[in-house]
Image: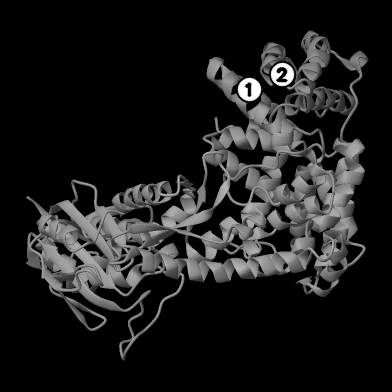
Amino acid sequence: MSGELLFEIGTEEIPSDYLDNALAEMGRLASAYLEEKHIPVSEELILHGTPRRMVLMGKGVSEMQEDIVEEITGPPRKAAFDQDGKPTKAALGFAQKQGVSVEELQVLQTPKGEYLYVKRSIPGKPTPEILAELLPKLIADIPWPKSMRWGSHPFAFVRPIHWVVALFNGKVIPFEVAGVKSGNRTRGHRFMAPQVLEVMDAGDYLSKMKKTFVLIDRQERAATIEKASAAAAKTVSGTPLMDAELLSTVTNMVEFPSAVCGSFDKAFLELPDSVLITAMKKHQKYFAVRDRHNRTMSHFVAVNNTIATDPSVVTKGHERVLRARLSDASFFFKEDRKRPLLGRLEELKGVIYQAQLGTSFAKVERFTRLAEFLSQQVAPEMVEEVRLASSLCKCDLVTSMVTEFPELQGVMGKAYARLDGHPGAVCDAIHEHYLPARAGDELPPSTIGAIVGLADRMDTIAGFFSIQMEPTGAADPFALRRHALAIIRILENMDWEMSLKGFIAKSLSILGEEISFDQQAVAEKVMDFFRERYRQMMLRSDYSTDLVEAVISAEFDSLHHLRYRLDQLKKFIAGFADFESLALTFKRIVNILKNQPEDFSVNPSLFKEPCESRLWESYQGLKNEVRQRTQKRQYFEALNLLVDLKKPVDEFFEGVEVLTKKDDALRKNRVAVLQELARLFLSIADFSKFAI
C-alpha cells in the first residue's frame, strides 16, 4: 500500500538566490534517504518553495519499509572448525552474537577463501517510524552557502525555523528539531493571513495555502509575476523587460505577487541603457520598461509581496528609492567622463592583481604582448586595434561606476571608449573579451574580442600554474577550469590554424621575464590541464571515452581539427563492420614499437620477402593522398584509404619475424617500415586506445 507524505519547513525569509539549489538538494537527499531505508516511492516527489517555506510532497510512498536481507560475514572456515570438524570458539562466538545456532551458519566462497556467514531477514518497519528519524536528518543535511544559529540551540540552518509540518496519511510524524516540534500546523501569508492553520493532508494544505495568499507553486508565481508586470507596464503603453535571472530572483522573494508601475525623471535616460537596467535590476529588483520601438522608458515595474491598499503610496516609495540610486549612478557617470578611459591605465598600477603576479597594470602589459603575438598569426592586419583594445579593456575597473556596479565591467568600458571616439571594433572588443562569462554563454563574435579574451585568460592560467596555485580536486578558486574551457570553445569557434603549445609557451615566456619558474615543467602541466578539460567537455558531449582518447592521444595542439576528427572517426566506426580487426592490427604495430628507442630509416634494398615489398609499395601508393585528405580535414576519406593497408600489414606480420635477432640491419629496416605506418595512422587517431 502507498501513502501520502506532506513535509513543510517554515522559516524566516530565505535568501532568494539560495532557494532553488536548496530545494533541488532537498529532493535529491529525500530520494536517496528513502531508497537507503528501503522505502519504495512509486511517484515522483514534488517540491515547492517560497521565501518562508520549503515543501516536500509524495503520494506514492510505501506504508511499510521493505524487509531487509542481511548477509553478515564471520570468521574464516578454517578458523571456525578444528581438525575433527567441531566448532571452535570463533564459530560459537559468531553464532551467539548473531542469535543463531552453529548449524544455521553457512559457508561463503570469497576471493580470500571460505568464510562463515549468516543470512537473515529483518522485517520492515512502518514508514512513519522511519520518517521520524529520517526527516530531522534531512533538514540538517540540506547544504547552504551560509547557515546561522539562533537562541540557545546548537542546530544550524539558513534561517530560524518557526514550524514544521510532518504528516503521513494525515497523521503527525513526531520529532523535534531546533526546539520546534513537528505537527499539523502551518501559517499563511506573513502580512495578509498570518494566522495558524491546521491541515489534514496535502490536498487540504494546498487549498488553505491558496486561500491564505500563498502561491506555493513556483511556476505559478512566476507566471503571475509576468502577467501582473505586463498589465502594470501596459498602463504607460510599455512592456516589461522580462530578464530571466531577475524573474527567478523576484519569484523567490514573494509568496503572493502584485505589481505597480512607477516612473523616474526623464533626465536619467541620458545614462547608458546598461546603467539604468543594472541600477533597477541589481539594487531594487525592478523590471525596466520598453516602448514599442524597444527603447527604454522612464518607467519601471516593481513587484510587491502584498496587495497594496493604496498602490499610489507604494509606487511613490519605490520611486523615491530608485531616484536615489539613479542620482548616484548619474554622478558616477559624470565623474568618470571627466577623464578619458585610456588615461586610467596608469591607475591599474595601484591595483594588486595577485601578490606574486604583480599589479593589474603588469597583467595588462603581459596579455597585451600575448595578444599581439596571436594577432600576428591569425589577423596581422589588426595588430594595432588588438593592442589598443588590450590596453583599454581593464581601465573601467578603476571607474566609479564599475566600483559601484561590478557587474558592469566591460559594459562601461565599451560605453566610455565609444564616447572617447575609439573605433567601434575596439569598443566592442572591450566587452566581448569577457565572453563567455559562464558555461553555455555566447562567445566573442569579433576577431579582436576573441584574441584579447584568449590572451587575458591564458595569462591567468599560466600565471597561477607558474606559482603552483593550480586547481586541486574540487577546489578551483580562480576559475581556471572555466577559463580553459572558454579558450577551447573560442579556438574551436574561430577555427584558427594555430598551435596551443606555442600559445602556452609564449605566455610563459613573457611571464618568465617577471618571475622565476621552470617553464618547461609548467608548460607540460598546463598542456595536460587543457587536454583534461577537453576530454571532459567531449565526454559530456556524448563522445565515447575510447573515441576521445584515440583522437587526443594522437595529437592535441591544433584544437580546430579535433572535433572534425571525432565526428568523422565516429562516422567511420559506425559504418565499417571490421573496425575491430583494423584497430587490432594497429595495436600490434604499436606494441612492437613500444620498446624501440629511436627512429630508423627504410631501405627498400634490404627487403627479403615479397610481403615486405608489397606493404611498402601499398604505403607509398597512398601516403600522399592520405596526408592531403587530412590536411583538408577529410578524415573519413583518409580512414577509408587506410583500410587498404590492413591486408598487406597482416601479410607482413605473417610472413616475417619483425624483431629478428639474426640480422640487426634487417630488424631495424622492418621496424622502420612500421614506424612509417604508425605515423600515418597517428595523423588521424591512436587506434591502440580502443578497448578491443
Q: Is residue 91 visible?
A: no
Q: Residue at 81% of width from left, 57% of height from top?
A: 521
The crowd level at tag 2 (other Cα within 10 Å; few <14, some 14-19, many 20+) is some
| Callout 2 secondary element | loop
Is the C-beta separation of discs 1 and 2 under 8 Å? yes
Side of 586 where 188 appears, left or right? left
The amino acid type, in three-letter code, at marker 1 is: Gln
Percent of width and height locating residue 668:
86, 28
In which quadrant will I find the C terminus?
A: top right
Mark linked to residue 634: 2
Question: In this rendering, is residue 170 above or below 149?
Answer: above
> Looking at the rendered structure, which numbered label has been put on residue 568?
1
Q: Earlier in the sequence, mark 1 or mark 2?
A: 1
Q: Position of residue 286 (x, y in %)?
A: 47, 59
Q: Is residue 349 left or right of residue 7?
A: right
Asked which quadrant contains residue 534, the reply is top right
Among the 4 quarters of the image, the one containing residue 509: bottom right
